[in-house]
Amino acid sequence: MNSALRTSMIAVVLVSCSTIVGDTPTETRSTRETMPSTTPETTDPAGRQCVHVTGDGSPVATGSVAGDALLLSVGLFRCADEVVVVGESDLNQVATAAQLAAALGGPLLHPHPQLAAELGRLKPLRVHLIGEVDVSTPPGAEVSRPDISAAVDLAQDALGVTEQVRLPSAPDASTVVETILALTARDRVVLPQSAPTSSTTAPVTPVIDPTAVVSGLARPSGSEFAWLVNASQPVAALSAAATGRAIGASVVAYDPGNVLGHPEVGSALAGRPIDAIRYVGTEPAGSSWEISALIRGLQVPGGGFHVFPAGQPRRYVAFYGHPETTGLGALGEQGPEATLERMAPLLAEYAADGSQVIPTFEIIASVASASATDGDYSEEWPPSSFDEWIRVAEASGAYVILDLQPGREDFLSQARQYEELLKLPFVGLALDPEWRLKPDQ
């Protein structure tokens, strides 16, 4: 068993319960901070206080869906009147179990060596087993084995809703998306059209389009917490959504291999601090800056977060020079608006092969000098010199490249003089190594 999971389970056993009314915790953060670490366990099942909103943003990635589900259960639930357990092989069953767990306000768990121990800790009144799962349940817990139709009816009764959304019999992206949207909204239930009728009937193999899952779940919400799940792991996404519903966490799917490839994910994450976003089932290395970029939502000209996006031919057509002289290139022969007008015929020609063309100002921000100037043989213009060009570029969807001819200065030191401009999503950097001198040149 994962050591972090084992440690968390031991720690949470010692923590008392907190009140939940319907699906909304009534306890505030300040209340939690002043509560004693332990309180006597109530003997009144109806008065049990089970959901524990910690705001923990640490990644949950034990290496298995079942392990992740246990870790989430340990972290969020001090007890649970209702627990749902389902296997991982049948996506229709998982979708059904997810909405039932969310409707009942309990965790969704999966077969695991530590499952019996977790059920013992939760002390459930009822355990609902979906599909052919063999589970040791605590003494006194009522056990039900509803089929998919009966489980949907239970969820519908718990929610008090009438609308049913029928899902395809062969699970696809809509199975994941529609289930998560429904269990989040709590105004409808979903129902697969058919399901295996016996343990000898093999479940239908799902065909999941991760891109469709990403776009389908990229919905802005008012939830405090957002959980990021891998769009290519549908069982993990459904499991996280079911358990996270207890604290109102929204589930957002993304592609760990191309975090910035789906700008719509940024809209779903916008408005939250980075520590309110939690990875569940995955922990990609080095992606925190990418998530920060998504949240800021500042895209490059032409759309998206990549200068050259995959699958979309994009070409940058630039006029080069310095705004204050005609001797260094065509850019200095007129102002920014006139430059765009002069570019227009060229842009059309360069777009003839179907490429998306971005008009570009390549501004020589520092010009190599034959004289020592301030000792570095490079004349640097202050960032304010380019204000008009920056303003016009932003308004017209143009890109700006700041070109450095550093002389004896190093590139990094000189680039830092333009740091505030380089933070803008439509400003990039060009380095002229032929104008980079050695200390004695």
Image (cartoon, rainbow, N blue to C red):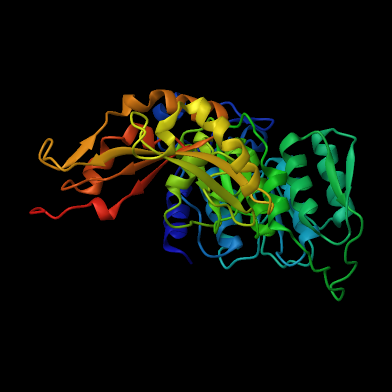
Residue ID at (83%, 37%): 188
Front residue of 31/385: it is: 385
Front residue of 367/283: it is: 367
Horizontal side, residue 421 vs residue 83: left or right = left
Quarter where residue 368 is shown: top left
Give residue 174's position: percent from left, percent from top: 79, 51
Horizontal side, residue 48 vs residue 176: left or right = left
Where 386 sits versus 347, above or below?
Answer: above
Where 30 sits versus 380, above or below?
Answer: above
Give residue 331's position: percent from left, percent from top: 43, 35
Residue ID at (17%, 53%): 437
Give residue 393's position: percent from left, percent from top: 50, 30
Give residue 82's position: percent from left, percent from top: 70, 46
Front residue of 113/179: it is: 179
- Which residue appears farthest toward the left when viewing the image? 440
Where 173 sits versus 48, above or below?
Answer: below
Front residue of 230/204: it is: 230
Horizontal side, residue 251 vs residue 431: left or right = right
> Is residue 78 shown to the viewer in this render?
no
> Is residue 135 shown to the viewer in this render?
yes
- Which residue appears farthest toward the bottom when viewing the image? 200
